[in-house]
């Protein structure tokens, strides 16, 4: 990711935070805008071309989306278009991140936990992963499948994110899309996501102690996602982004075996 894109992402997130009236309808329009822009090389190129004055790019947003989208949607899209992006592809990904953040703003439910749960379901079902991420089957059919699977099991915000991502995956793996969305939602809510691998479910007291310890270590609120993994044997393995804390019995045994072999 280029430095221009990094700055653009920050600026668009700040623009979203200062925009009033962001609800699920705005989030839906943002996802629809992602589909429209990603589906047109001419449009994505024009909106991300830094050689074109920012005001002109904002004007193009108003011309394309102003008559059919809400003012809040057009405002954040215009802000995104006025930034400098390293490439048209990164501009499209920036719009997608904006849509996910808007959903997080509009929906107060446990989107992170629901995204994680669905990603585990996909990981454990090869046929489902193929149905959602394979080249066969139309985008609308994939969206309908997601709606059916999540009906009554997840919030409207989670269903919107998942269905939008699988309908417009652009060659990306479903599980990777869900993990990225989970990280974006957590960041929007000023949290970090910790994936905990344990041999057995943690008690409420254990979860609280672990959250407090991780919050102190990373200086941020922590969302725990627990994976039951018998190979852990005992103790825990915790992953936060690329940081792995392995306090499992299996890790200590492996270390002991290496010391003996050495």
Image (cartoon, rainbow, N blue to C red):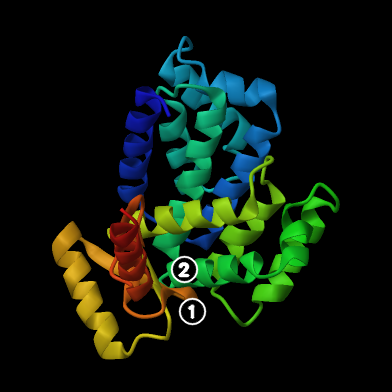
Residue 5 lies, with reference to residue 118, above or below; the image says above
Q: Secondary structure at mark 2?
A: helix
Q: Residue at x 60, y 41 (%)?
A: 34
Q: Is residue 189 visible?
A: no
Q: Quadrant of residue 187?
A: bottom left
Q: Quadrant of residue 127?
A: bottom right
Q: Is residue 112 visible?
A: yes
Q: Which residue is mark 1?
A: 230
Q: Which residue is mark 2?
A: 111
Q: Residue 118's x, y, as percent?
A: 58, 69
Q: Residue at x 60, y 37 (%)?
A: 65
Q: Residues within 10 Å of mark 1 (few under 14, many from 20)?
A: few
Q: Residue 81's x, y, as percent?
A: 47, 28
Q: Secondary structure at mark 1?
A: helix
Residue 230 lies, with reference to residue 257, above or below; the image says below
Q: Residue 218's x, y, as percent?
A: 19, 58
Q: Residues within 10 Å of mark 2 (few under 14, many from 20)?
A: many
Circle on res. 22 = none
Q: Quadrant of residue 50?
A: top left
Q: Residue 163's x, y, as percent?
A: 66, 59
How many angstroms separate mark 1 from mark 2 (CA)? 27 Å
């Amino acid at each position: 990711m280029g430095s221009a894109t990094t700055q653009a992402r920050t600026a668009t997130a700040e623009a979203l935070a200062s925009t009033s009236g962001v609800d699920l309808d705005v989030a839906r329009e943002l996802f629809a805008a992602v589909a429209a822009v990603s589906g047109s090389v001419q449009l994505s190129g024009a909106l991300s071309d830094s050689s074109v004055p920012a005001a002109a790019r904002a004007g193009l947003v108003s011309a394309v989306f102003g008559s059919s989208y809400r003012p809040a949607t057009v405002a954040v899209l215009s802000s995104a278009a006025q930034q400098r992006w390293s490439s048209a592809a990164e501009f499209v990904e920036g719009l997608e991140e904006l849509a996910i953040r808007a959903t997080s703003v509009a929906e107060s439910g446990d989107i992170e936990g629901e995204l994680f749960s669905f990603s585990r379901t996909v990981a454990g079902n090869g046929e489902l992963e193929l149905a959602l991420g394979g080249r066969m089957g139309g985008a609308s059919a994939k969206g309908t499948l997601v709606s059916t699977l999540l009906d009554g099991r997840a919030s409207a915000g989670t269903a919107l994110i998942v269905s939008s991502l699988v309908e417009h995956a652009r060659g990306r793996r479903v599980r990777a899309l869900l993990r990225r969305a989970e990280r974006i939602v957590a960041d929007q809510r000023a949290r970090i996501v910790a994936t905990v691998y344990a041999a057995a479910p943690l008690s409420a007291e254990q979860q609280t102690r672990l959250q407090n310890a991780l919050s102190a270590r990373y200086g941020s609120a922590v969302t725990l996602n627990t994976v039951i993994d018998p190979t852990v044997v005992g103790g825990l393995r915790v992953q936060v982004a690329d940081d792995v804390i392995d306090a499992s019995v299996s890790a200590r045994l492996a270390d002991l075996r290496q010391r003996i072999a050495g």
